[in-house]
Amino acid sequence: MKLHPMSSRIARIASSICQHSRRQVIFGAATTLGIGLAEPVRAQAPGLLRVVNSFEFRTLRPSETGFTFTRTGVAATLVATDFDGRIVPALAEDWVSSPDGLEWWLTLRAGVVFHDGTPMTAELVKASFEKLVPQSLFLKSADIRSIETTGRQIVFRLERPFGPFLAYLADTSVFVLAPASFSAQGEVAAVIGTGPFRIARANLPRELMLARHDGYWGRKPAFAQVQYDAVSNGETRANIAAAGDADLVLNIPTPSLARVGAGGRMRTTSAVIPRTHILMPNCAKPQFADARTRRALSLAIDRAGIAGSIMRNPSLAATH
């Protein structure tokens, strides 16, 4: 049995904190992700994990804030990806496709309940998909012709073969929601998911208070509550990390990493994760109509200089 990757990672971190009575900080910037350990600088509220991240959540619409709700363990998709980018089970425990690639049969995990106590059935998953797919970020491109159910299976029939369909089911804008999540107009009015944490309080756009979902099908979280604070300013997040005022801090700007580490409260490490920033000229404008102009602009960009100044590693520069 496999957990959603980020839920699994947070569970392992939470267990480590409980075992060693230490504070931890996760930080990253552009293409880095690090993890560090630090002794507590103040008494921690029993059973509470405080997380600080950069992503604000201005609405409850999954197409805009689905990443936040899946990564905090509130909601889950049918499949997920592991740390090596492989597709792994989530709410669906198994799957098979037809030889022509037009049908995908996914078997749902048994015993899953939503945060309001409603058992998850194939019919409810279908209803959730039918509401969310039209406004999804990626899955709407898969040309789903129909969604049907049979027992614990949900069947997707496509207009055309679509090889990456399974990966598209990991789209965080199409996680599975309980019927009570939707208004009479079909809009998302509440995020009632199936993850290890449920929303106890939501103060948009900067605060989520999460409570442990005791009916979660997988490994139970080590903490009873999680306070998630969205802090958009990178230097403010760095100050929080340097002071040890949170258990997990994500996305600290690279120039601040040395200061955080030198404070003595954090022992930090970093690892590269894939991320891309794209600069696209508007070819509809006359100054970019000539391919030679666009080529000259591309050649003028000092990619190694950008990577060296921001990431402190010129070898991370893009090649084109």
Image (tube, grey):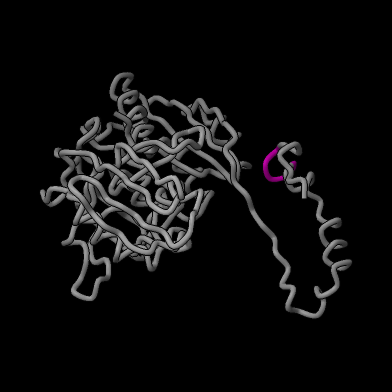
Q: Main secondary structure of the magenta part?
A: helix
Residue 230, percent from left and from top: 40, 53
Name which residue lies at 19% across and 56% down: 123
224 and 89: which one is in front?
A: 89
Please state the horizontal and vertical placement of residue 263, each as a whole percent of the image: 52, 31
Q: Position of residue 132 (x, y in %)?
A: 33, 63
* Front residue of 170 and 181: 170
The magenta segment = 308-312
Q: Is residue 241 visible?
A: yes
Is residue 309 a member of the stretch shown in magenta? yes
Residue found farthest to the left = 117
Asked which quadrant contains residue 181, the reply is bottom left
Residue at the (77%, 45%) spot, across then down: 319
Image position of 121 with respect to 182: above or below: above
**On the picture, is 205 further left or further right than 35?**
left
Residue 242 appears in view: no
Residue 157 image point, x, y percent: 36, 57
Most foreground residue, 310 or 215: 215
